[in-house]
Image: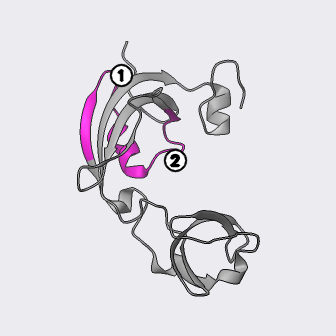
Amino acid sequence: MTLMIGNNSVVSIHYTLKNEAGDVIGSSEDNQPLEYLHGSKNLIPGLESELHGKSSGASFSTVIPPQQAYGEVRTDLIKEISKDLFQGVESVEAGMTFLAHGEDGAEQQVRVTAVSGDEVTVDANHPMAGMTLHFEVEIVDVREGTEQEIEHGHVHQPGADH
């Protein structure tokens, strides 16, 4: 009997992810398939929605707009801050990433996008925010999640409980 992907299914997929220009920006091709627990918000909503109801062996291509992926770029997450805040960092350069504390105290990753004199522009948007994502997906396996996986909200590897 073929199991269809639904909530609490453990799904294994191979994927290739491309941007609008057709450049590959992610792939599981040379790795193990990506495993996730369906319905636990472990994937972007648009891809999870496309997988729902499909079964092992299926292959498909899909285009996911920013609203169903990592969202649009939020300008309120782009800030100019003083270079003095980077204590202990010898040279701050565009492209570097840091963990910072947001206004609510929560840790968030920020990317340095520009350095001008004593001012540093940082961006806390997801690196793929604002991007339309093009996926090619092959469903490798579908199984029912274990009680523990469902309780924890993610897949457990064999012999591990976390």
Q: In which quarter of the image is residue 93?
A: bottom right
The amino acid type of the residue labelled 2 equals Lys
Question: Which residue does the numbered mark 2 point to in the structure image?
Answer: 41
Q: Is 34 drawn above or below residue 57 in the view shown?
A: below
Residue at image position (33%, 38%) is: 16
| Image quarter (top left, top right, bottom left or bottom right) of the C terminus | top right
Magenta span covers which residues? 35-62
Which residue corresponds to the image point at 25% horizontal and 56% vertical from the top-left? 20
The residue pinned by badge 1 equals: 56
Q: In the image, what residue occupies the spot 37% across and 12% down? A: 1
Q: In this view, does 83 lie above or below 10?
A: below
- Secondary structure of the residue carrying numbered label 1: loop
Identify the mark nearer the N-term, 1 or 2: 2
Q: Residue 17 lies in what quarter of the image?
A: top left
Question: Within the magenta stretch, is there residue 30?
Answer: no
Kindly identify the amino acid type of the residue bearing the numbered disc 1. Answer: Ser
Task: Give me the residue at 42% from left, 63% from top.
Answer: 129
